[in-house]
Structure formats: C-alpha cells, structure tokens
Amino acid sequence: DVQLQASGGGLVQAGGSLRLSCAASGFTLADYAIGWFRQAPGKEREGVSYIRSSDGTTFYIDSVKGRFTISSDNTKNAVYLQMNSLKPEDTAVYYCAAAPPELLGTIATNYDYWGQGTQVTVSS
C-alpha cells in the first residue's frame, strides 16, 4: 500500500522555525521527485520546493529562498523541509507529494502520490 505521511506542522511565532517530515511507505522516495506544496485558505495550492535525490536537484520558489531547505534521507525513506524565519504569509496546510523523476517541477497534476497535509500556522 503506497502512502505518504507528512508531519511536523504546528503553531509558531513569526521568525520561528519548523521542520516538516515526509515519510513514505510502499515505495522508495529516492526513485521519485518529491515536492512540498502548500495551500492557504482561499488560495490555490502552490508548489514550494522539490527535490530529486537521484541527482541532487532542488528548487525553491522565490518567497522561501534562503529560508527553507529541502533535504532527503534515503536510509529513512524520508524528505524534510526545514523552515526558518517563518512569516505569517507562510501559514498554510503543507503537503508532500511524489512524482516520476522526469516530471520534476511544481505542477501539482504531475504528482501521483500525496500525503494528508500538515497545518503550519505562523502568528505575527
């Protein structure tokens, strides 16, 4: 049974940090491109960052560059999103998702498997 489990969200003050985890079961994350998406109330889901651990390719949207870091641990079959200097506008439900590595990008429809989402709330 293929599953992705996102965790690590919570309530934090502006300027604080959170580390999101994405754990996979039933498949090997290293064989896929893994993306982090977020959706704030009333807004469309947007791709935030992705990683393809097979060649180390990473990407960040401009609004999180320098603050967020995506990484992978193949021994734990997990991908992480370290979020520092959080801002109220980072408040959203964060999802991890897996796509075929050749479809690496921020287009949500390319992603086959999705985790259930974890809430990140940043207070001002």
Image: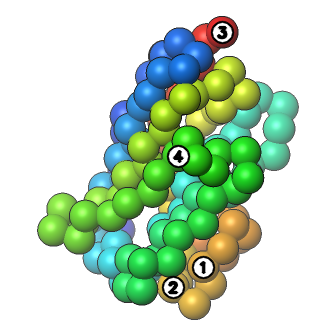
Q: State the CA–CA distance, disc 3 to disc 2.
A: 37 Å
Name the residue at 65% across, 32% down: 90
Mark 3 closeness class: few <14, some 14–19, many ≥20 residues within 10 Å: few
Q: Which of label 2 and label 4 is nearer to you?
A: 4
Q: In the drawing, does residue 61 fall left or right of residue 12?
A: right
Is residue 9 among what the camera can see? no
Q: Is residue 98 left or right of residue 110?
A: left
Residue closest to the eye, 78 or 68: 68
Look at mark 4 in the image and give the residue it sits on.
68
Residue 66 horizontal side relative to residue 9, left or right? right
Disc with the residue nearer the chain's start (2 vs 4): 4
Q: Which of marks 4 and 3 is nearer the N terminus?
A: 4
For label 2, the crowd category at 10 Å Cα-Cα, with few meaning under 14, some 14 to 19 and many 20 or more, is some
Which amino acid is tagged 2? Pro
Q: In this rendering, which labeled residue sits more in front, label 4 or label 1?
A: 4
Residue in the picture at 48% in, 21% down: 16
Q: Residue at x 54, y 29 (%)?
A: 85
Q: Mark 3 points at which residue?
A: 124
Q: Residue 116, image x and y in percent? A: 48, 45
